[in-house]
Amino acid sequence: MRRAFFLSLCMALLLTLGACGAEQHVWAEATCTKPRSCSTCGKTEGMPLGHDADGEPNYQQALVCSRCGAVLRERLAGDFEKAHIPINLSLNKEAEYYAACASQAWHKTTGVVCIQSDEPVQPDGSNGLPTAPEGYEWHLVTASAVFNDSKAQSYGVHLSLRLEDRYTTALFDSSAEYSDDTGFTTHQISCFGKEAICLERVSCEPNDWVLNSDGVPELSYRITLEYCVPQGYDGIVLGFLSPMKSTDESLSILDLYTSSNFLAYAPTGAD
């Protein structure tokens, strides 16, 4: 009887102290999803910490736990992403571009566009750029469009340039305010969940007709985009719209876009 009582007491003590024995646990600290636990016997104590994150996801960032880095909510999908509009122009790569003719719009001409440079720029007395607000930066993008087919020679060329914001197209378009005094247009944008502005100016200047290396008359355009946005913002898109059967260029790009009528470049190198 004593032996049975002794064994029962030992078992009770073992159950009380745990498999590691008194003061023997090797504790691993609690995480966001797991309580404090003994790495030797698996005993747990307390509760998980729970994820730690403030705010909401936005177009540029997912909602992420500050402790473990887990993505709690994915970033918001922008208008271009939802409409499956790709960024299909890249720096120093030529792309075929279909444009309407200037004097006879039902005729089409085929040319080549190329983004030639993309770089930050500082305002100075020569470029007419106003000082950037704190936390903002100016960028300069230059591009070319070249045409030399018979339709361009006979009827000229009509370039349809589009400046867009790939996250909030409607906000960007509806908030546009042009200044006759400066030649710049101001737009509202959404940057890391906060309201911000984009200040931009686009120009498209034709050169004179010249003979190219093959002796064919050629017309080229120089396109420049100057824009000021919060540092690191990647939503601005320079686009080239090709003509369609129904061409109302005042419509949203979401209404005009097809898989074959729009070339788009994101100056900050967005995917």
Image: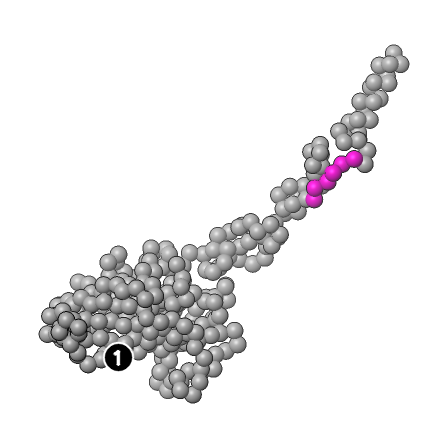
| Disc 1 crowd, CA 10 A, few/some/many (<14, 14-19, 20+) | few
Q: Which is more toward the observer, 212 or 81?
A: 212
Residue for point 44% across, 82% down: 123
SS for callout 1: strand
Q: Which residue position is annotated with label 1?
A: 205
Outermost residue, front direction?
213
Residue for point 35% across, 71% down: 117
Q: Which is more toward the observer, 171 or 156?
A: 156
Residue for point 60% across, 54% down: 66
Is 163 on the left or on the right of 77, as rendered? left
Give the quadrant of residue 209.
bottom left
Visible residue check, residue 132: yes
Mark 1 residue type: Glu
Q: Is residue 11 above or below residue 251?
A: above
Position of residue 232 measured from the top left corner of the image (x, y, whole percent): 47, 67
Q: Is residue 25 magenta?
A: yes
Is 154 on the left or on the right of 241, as rendered? left
Position of residue 191 measured from the top left corner of the image (x, y, whole percent): 47, 66
Q: Is residue 86 above or below residue 203?
A: above
Quarter in which the C terminus is drawn: bottom left
Q: Is residue 52 above or below residue 269?
A: above
Position of residue 241 measured from the top left corner of the image (x, y, whole percent): 25, 66
Give the quadrant of residue 239.
bottom left
Tell me which secondary structure the magenta stretch mostly adopts.
loop
Residues in magenta?
A: 24-29
Residue for point 27% across, 60% down: 257
Position of residue 6 measured from the top left corner of the image (x, y, whole percent): 86, 18
Q: Is residue 149 magenta?
A: no
